[in-house]
Image (spheres, grey):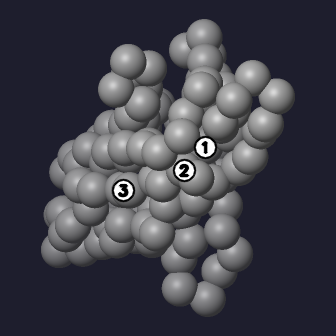
């Protein structure tokens, strides 16, 4: 069993910054990839950023140059540093992880989400 818990969401003005954190806990052998998704009201959940075990990253075009995903493997955590926030970044942000609970058992897990609201 693996649990993901997000934190760091809140209200921020346009142009401001916010850092989201996601902590993974439970039966973890190895986290192979972690990602951030977001879902705005009335819209489908979309991929924001991903990072693999080696630190490689990918970003949605809408956040390139503004968001940075990083991870702390020792602490089983992933972060999303969000700069130059725009109102269209408003959404519930979800942490996602692909996890080996043992050397041969892999599963994908989701956090419950944290609200980010960008508004003046």
Mark 2, secondary structure of its residue: strand
Residue drawn at 44 percent across, 67 percent down:
113
Residue occupied by mark 2: 2
Q: Nearer the viewer, residue 25 or 56?
A: 25
Q: Position of residue 108 (x, y in %)?
A: 71, 49
Q: Is residue 110 left or right of residue 77?
A: right
In the rendered view, would you say 68 is above or below 118? above
Task: Locate residue 92, reporting x and y percent.
Answer: 45, 70
Q: Residues within 10 Å of mark 1 (few under 14, many from 20)?
A: many
Image depth: mark 1 or mark 2 in front:
2
Is any part of residue 37 visible from this angle?
A: no
Question: Which residue is at the far right?
Answer: 104
Instruction: State the separation of the CA atoms marked 2 and 3.
Output: 13 Å
**Which mark lies nearer to you, 2 or 3?**
2
Mark 2 or mark 1, which is nearer the start of the sequence?
A: 2
Asked if residue 102 shows in the view, the reply is yes
The residue beneath circle 3 is 6
Seen at 34% across and 71% down, the residue is 115
Label 3 element class: strand
Nearer to me, 95 or 100: 100
The residue beneath circle 1 is: 97
Q: Residue at x 59, y 26 (%)?
A: 29
Q: CA distance from mark 1 to mark 2?
A: 9 Å
**Circles 2, 3 touching at the beta carbon (< 8 Å):** no
Which circle's residue, 3 or 1, is located before the other in the chain? Answer: 3
Q: Is residue 78 above or below residue 54?
A: below
Is the C-beta separation of discs 1 and 2 under 8 Å?
Answer: yes
């Amino acid at each position: 069993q693996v649990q993901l818990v997000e934190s760091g969401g809140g209200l921020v003005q346009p142009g401001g910054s916010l850092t989201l954190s996601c902590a993974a806990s439970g039966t973890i052998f190895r986290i192979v990839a972690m990602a951030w998704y977001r879902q705005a009201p009335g819209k489908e959940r979309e991929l924001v950023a991903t990072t693999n075990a080696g630190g490689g990253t990918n970003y949605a075009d809408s956040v390139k140059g503004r968001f940075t995903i990083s991870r702390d493997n020792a602490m089983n955590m992933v972060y999303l540093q969000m700069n130059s926030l725009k109102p269209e970044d408003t959404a519930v942000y979800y942490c996602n992880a692909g996890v080996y609970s043992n050397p041969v058992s892999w599963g994908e897990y989701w956090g419950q989400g944290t609200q980010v609201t960008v508004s003046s």
